[in-house]
Image (cartoon, rainbow, N blue to C red):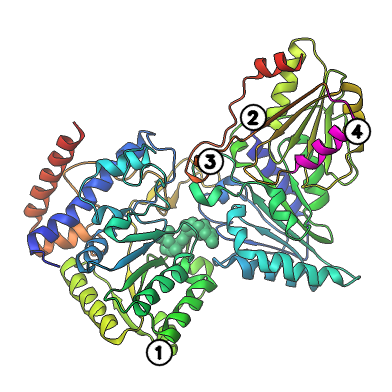
Amino acid sequence: MNMDKRSIAREVIRLRVQQMVVNEWYKAGRFKIPIHLGFGHEALAVAVSAVMGRGDWLFLTHRNIAYNLGREKSLKPFLDEYSLKPTGVAGGRFGSMNLIHPSRGILYTSSILANQFPVAVGSAFGFTVSDANGIAIVCGGDGAIEEGAFYESVLMAASIKAPILFLIENNEWSMHTSIRERRVDIDLKKLASSLGVLYVSLKGNNVFAYIQALARARKQILTSRAPLCIEVKVNTLGDWYDMKNPLYPQGKFVKYHTGASPSVMLSEEVVLQKNADDPLFVLGKLISEASVKKMAVQELAHIRKEMI
Amino acid sequence: MTYLSFLNCILRKEIATHTNLVVFGQNISAGSYLGGLTAGLSVPPESRIINTINAENSLVGFGFGLALSGTNAIFFMRQIDFLLLTTDQLVNTYNIIRNNPAGLPGSFTIMTTVIDQGYEGPQSSSNNLGDFCSLARIDAFTVTNKRDIEAIIPAQLVSPGFRIIAASPRLYKTDLLEPPLAYRSPTGNLFQYQEGNDTTIICFNLSFPYGYALAQAMQTKGLHPSLFSVNIPVPIKWNVILESVKKTKKLVIFDDSKSMNCSYYALLAEARLRFNLQKEIIITRHLGSDWLTPNSDQLEIDYQKVIKDIV
Ligand SMILES: Cc1ncc(C[n+]2csc(CCOP(=O)(O)OP(=O)(O)O)c2C)c(N)n1
Ligand SMILES: [Mg+2]
């Protein structure tokens, strides 16, 4: 990780603007495949990419776009992939839900909830077997940790000492159902510690703080050769109010899950929400709102140039 | 009326009448209501609707447990891909339960869909309900039109024992097909929609709309086919179909699955053995290396060419 503050900030903005372009293409009906956008996930995705070592592997979920963009600079190969063209980043063979990028460390991506956890434990243990210096980072949501495979994977990783980071993105929603509507709270700290696994909680979308915390966690995993669990509070942005639903003639709040977000418009105003739920808002407080806007304008100009 | 609104309407009607029923599944009373399938469900006060956690194998076990205790259960599962996580319960639990001659006192139905519009990539390569059911000889029913929905849902949704019912998301927004019904087997596994001597059309998995379109195109040309839909994974008794083939000696088979082991093989083998077939046309997926990449699952059929081939 050799990034100065400015390049880090630029990365966060890039992921926001690039996703906004994807969203516009999506609105225009240019994709036939489902894409799960990750507005609000940018700071975390940039931090993960920043701390990844050369040999580390990343295991992703259906909501992988921010991580994938984070590992590759240019947007065009993604637009091509989502349009299922051979010039896509994965040859147009994967679309979005299973998009991998092995040369950039993204080894496996699952659209089946929790399916990625045991696969990642296996690959992580491969580092132990070959005595290689690397860790596996596996992402999963608050919905995925409900699956038995999550518990089994943490137990397995703890028991065999696999160098793996379980990165749980808790956005409180599974599709259109909030945690409150589907289950009791899961105290991940207690669950992890009951298996002897270290637990760290992150929130606030400060990309610089996230990088520090993730770098510390990575170091800890490498020295202990044991798993660690980080739970990150995220708000997946892009919700809207649905006025068309016949069941709710007065309108109904729709939590963003997949598809194009009608509430997000492509513009230089990249902040979607004026609070800590939006990494771009937080960034504005850290470096200045004017710098964020300036870099957003530059990023947009860059994308326009790339597209011509 | 669309296929989806009719299906939703009949599901709502059925579910509203049952006491002692637990309806459960992920996102069934939130968001898009499984694409509209479960919109507006309500049950009498003695029954329950549960918006569950994501834990498929446990949810199927839960359904079997309810039915074992005499409480009826319906598990709404978005698509069969996620049911792949439940094979332990579907095979081991179901077989142990079945081995008891007393059987299941309650009803357990898994109401699901087979992803048949494509574009979901690797996860939707499994689109043959028959493959799924042959794991443990599970009864299953596909529904594609007004007649089979009307026959199958009221009879099967809540009825002692276990079964899977699968709908077709490809048809959700299309106009409901209302073909005239000529015959239906008592168990609802075989439907005949037309009787004619010119050829025998048989549809498997969720391919009925293609067969119906061919039958209609033939009729406009003054030709009269017999049209069948096999709504359950084989084996079934083919007699009614074979009687038709005996007359027509011409066979058109539709199967929209990507399986290596299609349900129509057994019928085709028997028809070839018994009759001197003059014509056999099989319209199915021609899979190259693209079978697990995201692409359209729609069969591209030139009906006029098929008719020419038959005649
Ligand atoms: C085994 C399985 N069950 C159900 C689904 C359908 N599904 C797709 S995404 C999703 C929500 C997952 O929630 P979470 O893990 O919190 O991720 P988020 O979408 O919130 O990022 C569900 C239920 C699935 N993909 N796999
Ligand atoms: Mg979530």
Relative side of A283 to A101, left or right? left
Q: Amino acid at mark 2?
A: Asp
Q: Which residue is mark 2?
A: B175
Q: Is residue B127 left or right of residue A133?
A: right
Report whether A167 appears left or right of A145: left
Residue drawn at point x = 75 percent, y = 21 percent? B215
Question: To which residue does mark 4 refer?
Answer: B274
Report the Cα–Cα distance between label 3 and label 1. 43 Å
Q: Mark 4 near mark 1, Cβ–Cβ under 8 Å?
A: no
Image coordinates for residue A95, horizontal then vertical, percent: 40, 45
Label 4: few (<14), some or many (≥20) within 10 Å? few
Determine the residue positioned at 26% across, 85% down: A223
Residue B11 colored in magenta in the image: no
Residue at 44%, 79% (x, y): give it: A154
Specify the segment rendered in magenta. Answer: B263-277
Q: Chain of mark 1?
A: A
- Quadrant location of the C terminus of chain A? top left
Q: Which of these two is toward me, B6 or B187? A: B187
Q: Amino acid at mark 3?
A: Gly
Q: Mark 1 — residue?
A: A196
Disc 3 and disc 2 on one polypeptide chain: yes
Q: Nearer the viewer, mark 3 or mark 2?
A: 3
Badges 3 and 4, same chain:
yes
